[in-house]
Amino acid sequence: MVDSTPRKRADARRNESALLDAAAATFATSGVDAPVRTIAAKAGVGVATIYRHFPTRADLVVAVYRHQVEACAAAAPVLLAAGPTPHAALSRWIDLFVDFVVTKHGLAEALQSDATTFDTLHAYFLDHLVPACAALLTAAADAGEIRPDTDAYELLRAVGNLCVGDNPRYSARRVVGLLVAGLRVH
Amino acid sequence: MVDSTPRKRADARRNESALLDAAAATFATSGVDAPVRTIAAKAGVGVATIYRHFPTRADLVVAVYRHQVEACAAAAPVLLAAGPTPHAALSRWIDLFVDFVVTKHGLAEALQSDATTFDTLHAYFLDHLVPACAALLTAAADAGEIRPDTDAYELLRAVGNLCVGDNPRYSARRVVGLLVAGLRVH
DNA sequence: CAACATACGGAACACGGTTCCGTTTGCCAA
DNA sequence: TTGGCAAACGGAACCGTGTTCCGTATGTTG
């Protein structure tokens, strides 16, 4: 099988990389919903160049956070093997996910938005994290620790929702802890 | 004590009422974030008239839903008196709140937005519902049914968050149920 | 080095919230 | 009844942001 992608132009690769750096920096300081023009300016390119490389904002966000999402997904089996019980592993894995989301300003909001712009983001997160979460849920259910009918998609969506608006008076971690506690059989 | 408000002009009162009707109708069909121009058009007034009567969008939303929020708050003591246990009353009251929020398109999103535009909405909901919820929480805690350190603001905020994106695949009611279950002492 | 496709930049457009300002209208007093 | 004035109005204008278009520049290949 031949490499069918005919290698992009050098300036295109340079710009794509500059955009990723600029986006990462901008997301960190101003949140994932920073104006497109800001990111373009920081990268030293025109706005159209963003759209050329990342058709939707979601593609850019995914590109920036891809590694962390994959690391999170990969942690699930590790925690399951390490943890004292499946429920403990589930709880720790969710902590990981919550930490990831709450530290990225605006990511939680973006995740819950059903606007077409963020479809890709939604799909990416779901594709990678739902299976990871489902494995933990199944293990915990098999161990009789939680009710067996819990849906991974629903749980992740709920946790993502709870991550919105984290601040000193509203601790996403704490309320997610309550939710996870609510999964247990009594 | 004299009536110090010098009675508004007749057309002003008429327009305010028309705006409330138009807003209620528009919110029901297009959500609370419907374009201002749409509401103005439906009410047969200019956009500036909206801002004159309702300085922020939140004021308009509050005006439309005021009665329902007050009814919800008023239901708390009734349920507490009626329910078999405080926790049951809490659970039912939260169901009431969830039903109210999920049936108003975009209300949950608006509630969690920390943008200045919705400060008034936030404040109104909090002022009315936090005390109602706190009473239920205290009663349940006194009865030893739930952990005693649960904060009404945090709980309401969490429930509001969970109401975002309700759809066949994600049931806000179900996940809120899990959260409320998680409040129980074990 | 010529020619061509690729990629670029920024102006232009769409759209929604908010404000401004010239005009109209209800109200009251003469 | 009417004259005057403050209250209220309508819609154009402004601003910020996402998205697209198009004339131009540039890397690549023969």
Image (cartoon, coloured by chain):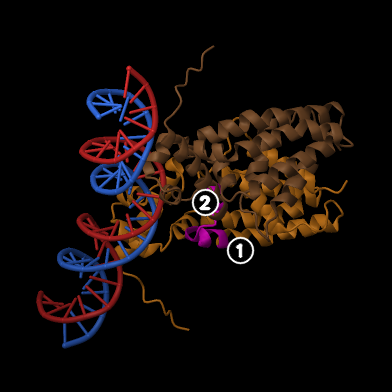
Chain colours: A brown, B orange, C blue, D red
At 68% from the left edge and 61% from the top edge, which residue is drawn?
A: A168
Q: Which is in the foreground here, disc 1 or disc 2?
A: 2
How crowded pointer 1 is (Cα within 10 Å; few <14, some 14-19, many 20+) is rated as few
- Residue C30 sits in which quadrant? bottom left
Residue at 46 percent of width and 25 percent of height: A7
Q: Residue at x 83, y 36 (%)?
A: A87
Instruction: From the top left corner, tell me how far across and down residue B88 is, in percent.
Output: 77, 47
Mark 2 chain: A
Callout 1: SS: helix
Q: Quadrant of residue B177?
A: top right
Q: Which residue is mark 2?
A: A26
Q: Chain of mark 1?
A: B
Residue B127's disc number: 1
Answer left or right for B90 relative to B123. right
What percent of the width, then of the height, locates residue A100? 67, 45
**Is there CB contact under 8 Å for labels 1 and 2?**
no
Residues behind callouts 1 and 2 on a single chain? no
- Depth check: A146 or A79 in front? A79
Residue B25 visible (yes or no) = no
User: Which residues fall within the magenta stretch?
Assistant: B107-123
Instruction: Answer left or right for A1 relative to B79.
Output: left
The percent coordinates of residue A184 (x first, y second) are: 82, 37
Can residue A29 be seen here? The reply is yes
Majority secondary structure of magenta residues:
helix
Residue closer to the observer: A127 or B100: A127
Q: Amino acid at mark 2?
A: Thr
> Does the segment drawn in magenta span residue A32?
no
In the rendered image of this protein, does residue B95 appear above or below residue A120?
A: below
Mark 1 vs mark 2, CA separation in Å? 36 Å
Q: Is residue B119 magenta?
A: yes
Q: Which mark is residue B186?
A: none
